Image (spheres, grey):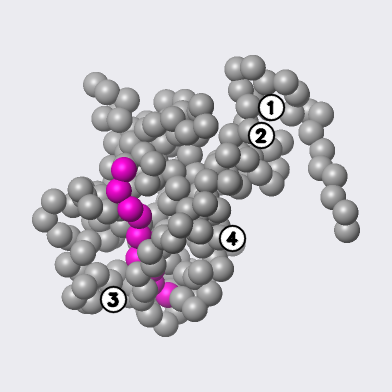
Amino acid sequence: MSAVAKLKDDEMYYGEFGRKWLSNSDISMLMNNPTMFRKGKSDSKAMVMGRYFHWAVLEPHKAESIICIDSTTRSTKIYKEATRDGNMALLCHEKDQVDKMVDAIKGNFDFFEGIYEDGNSFEMPEVGSLFGLPWKGKADIVNDNRIIDLKTTSSIGSFRHSAYKYNYDSQAYIYQNLFGVPMEFWVIDKNSMAMGMFHCSDEFLRSGEQKVKAASEIYNRFFGESSTESIDNHYIVEEL
């Protein structure tokens, strides 16, 4: 079985096997706090909601594994017991919010047609080399003409700013290089249910390229096979 075929499995992609490659999720930590690079962290509320959203749109059979807790907060005993063994859970009002987004996406003709177009493949991994290092990506939706990445936002009007803040520019650069087709971000506002389709400009991709290059240099400096410095000696110098 090829590496790409193995990475189709989420456990392989996000587990030890997948750590052979860098991914866009590593960019922020490498650039901002490399001392915490690949240190374990628990799933946040936003991550679980995002995962459920993607599953509900693209892989509904997986969405059934999300536990719905009828509680007001995560500090309650019932929530803590439900997630004790690593199970993913949402409060019921959070699940309802995601379900509304899924219904809105499916209720928009252009979004529905684009997402479920004949020839589309969902959650497809790919690997390749960038700046001399191995990188991976898993496309939400891909065909011979484009990649579609589904995003949620708290403000559709601020998505352009958020796209840079959350490193969607580096994601676009990585994915377009790995898959060889243009990338688009299809976005829904979590509050208003407003939707947008965002294409990647040359400027956006150049910004992403610079981030990937910078992250690669930091990786080589501290973690690469020929690393020149120990991460224990890392510190930052800035002018306030």
Report which quarter residue 190 is drawn in: bottom left
Percent from the top left, x then y, of residue 170? 50, 49
Q: Residue at x 45, y 48 (%)?
A: 173
Q: Earlier in the sequence, mark 3 or mark 1?
A: 3
Report which quarter residue 96 is drawn in: bottom left
Q: Earlier in the sequence, mark 2 or mark 4?
A: 4
- Tell whether position 187 is magenta: yes
Give, as a three-letter code, the residue at label 2.
Answer: Ile
The residues colored magenta run 180-189
Can you identify the residue that label 2 sits on? 218
Mark 2 and mark 1 in contact (Cβ < 8 Å)? yes
Can you identify the residue that label 3 sits on? 104
Mark 1 and mark 3 in contact (Cβ < 8 Å)? no
Mark 4 and mark 1 in contact (Cβ < 8 Å)? no
Q: Earlier in the sequence, mark 1 or mark 4?
A: 4
**Marks 4 and 3, how far apart in space?**
26 Å
Regarding mark 3 in the picture, which secondary structure is present there?
helix
